[in-house]
Amino acid sequence: MAKQVEVRHMSMELFYESMALSQFAFQYEKSADELEQSKEQFATEPAVRYAAYVDNKFAAQAAVLELQTYIGGKVYDMGGLAGVATWPEYRRQGLVAQILIQSLSEMRSKGQFISFLHPFAFGFYRKFGWETYTEHKAYTIKSEQLPARIAYEGHIERLDGDYSKLSDIYHAYASKYNGSLVRTELWWKYRISKRKPGQIGLYYDKSGEAAGYVIYEVKNSRLTVHELIYLNEEARRALWSFISQHDSMISELTITVPSDDQLPFLLSDPRIKQEVIPYFMARIVDAEKFIEGYSFQASNTDDQIPIQLRDEHASWNDGCYLLQIDAAGKAVFNRLDKIQGSENAIKMDIGSLSAMLLGYLRPTQLTQFARIEGDSELIKRLHDRIPERTTYLPDFF
C-alpha cells in the first residue's frame, strides 16, 4: 500500500518536535534555557518552515530563511535553505526532494530569485540545481609568524560583546563582494552573537571615523579570529598590529578570510598553513527575473546571446532564451519558442549559470569543464560582459 506523503508549512506547535529532530540529526543538545532562546528565535526570525509527513507522521523538515544578499553591489532577496533533516526511518524516500521543489516555487512567488545553502553533500544538492558559489581561505599562523607590529595614527576601542557599532562598517565591506549577507538587527542578535562570541577591537582613524573591526577569542593559547573587517589599508594594518599585540599569550592564530586575501605576501615568513575550503552553494530560482536586476559590464555595443538553459526542477527556467545586454549593462532574458541555428547557442544548466553570474567561475573556465558548450565567440562575448567580483560569505545558516 502506497504511503501518503504531504509537505506542510510548520507552525509554532511543532517547535519541540522540530528541535528534537534537529538535535538528533546535527548531534547537539540544548539546555532548557537554550531551548527557550531557540523558541524565541523560531517565532521571530522571518522564515518559511516546512514539515514533511508520511501517513500523518512527522518525518522531515527544512526552513527557508528570508534573507538578502549583495550581488554586484545591489541587494537581492534570497531564500536561505537551512535545517534540512530527516528521521532515519524515512530517509532515501524523496521527502527532501519534495520539500526542495515546493520551496523553489514558493521562493519564486515571493521574489526570492536566488537561494543559498550550506550542503551536507555537494553532489546531493547539485542534482537539484544548486552549485558551489564561494570558498574561503583558512590560515593557521604561529605566533612568531604574525604580521609586524606598527605605529598607527588612529586608535583601537576594545569592546566586550557589543556588536551595535559594527553594522555600518560590515555593510560597506560586504557590499564589495558577491554573496555576502545584508545583516539585520535580528541576525546580529541571534546569529553573530552566538557563532562569533568574544572580544571586539574597533578601529577609529585619526579623524575619529570607525574604519574596521576584529571579533576574536583567546582560549588555550590559541587566538581565533571570528571576523576581520576593514574599509582601507590603514585599518587593515592597524587591526593586524593590534592582533599581533597578543603574541605573548598565544602559540598560534586561526582565521578565515576571503579567497582573494593575500596576507602571506605581506609576511616576513609567508610559509603559513593555508587551506582553501569550498563553502556554500547557490541557485538562481527565476532566471528571467534574476537577470532583469543584474548589472552586466558596460560595453561599446549591445550584445544578443542565445542561451539554451536546462533546469530539471524548475520548469519556468527550462528552455531557450535570448540574452540581450545593452551598452550600459542592463539586460533582459527573453524566452523563445526555439533558437534559429541552435547549434550556435550557449548551452548550460542552472547551476552553471548561477556560479557564473555570481562570479565564482568565469564562462571560459566553465567551458574547460564542459559545463558550458557552444560557439566560442559567443562565449567570449558573454565572458567580457560579466563583471569580475570575488564571492565571499562570512556567515553560516
Image (cartoon, rainbow, N blue to C red):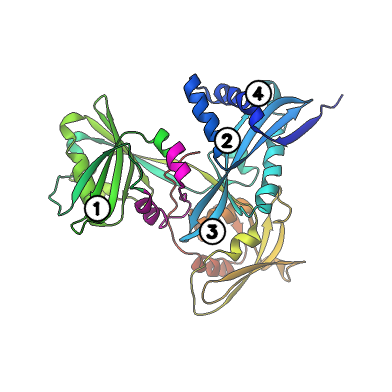
Which of the two labelled residues, at mark 3 and mark 4, occupies the earlier sequence position?
4
The disc label shown at residue 235, or none = 1
Q: From the viewer's perspective, is 87 left or right of 249?
A: right
Q: Amino acid at mark 2?
A: Ala
Q: Is residue 141 visible?
A: yes
Q: Is residue 249 above or below residue 206?
A: above
Which residue is situated farthest in the bottom direction here?
Answer: 300
Residue found at x 55% / y 38%: 44
* Pair 3/4: label in front: 4
For numbered disc 4, what is the local secondary structure? loop
Q: Amino acid at mark 1?
A: Ala
Q: Amino acid at mark 4?
A: Trp
Check disc 1: other Cα within 10 Å, few if <14, some if 14-19, many if 20+: many
Determine which quarter of the picture holds residue 218.
top left
In percent of width and height, residue 7 lies at: 73, 35
**Residue in the foreground of this view, choosing between 30 and 255:** 30
Q: Which residue position is annotated with label 2?
A: 43
Q: How many marks?
A: 4
Classify the position of the N terminus by image quarter: top right
Q: Which residue position is annotated with label 3?
A: 357
Determine which quarter of the picture holds residue 85.
top right
For numbered disc 3, what is the local secondary structure? helix
Residue found at x 50% / y 22%: 28
CA–CA distance in space, label 3 to label 4 = 36 Å
CA–CA distance in space, label 1 to label 2 = 38 Å
Which of the two labelled residues, at mark 4 and mark 1, occupies the earlier sequence position?
4
Residue stretch rendered in magenta on the structure: 167-190
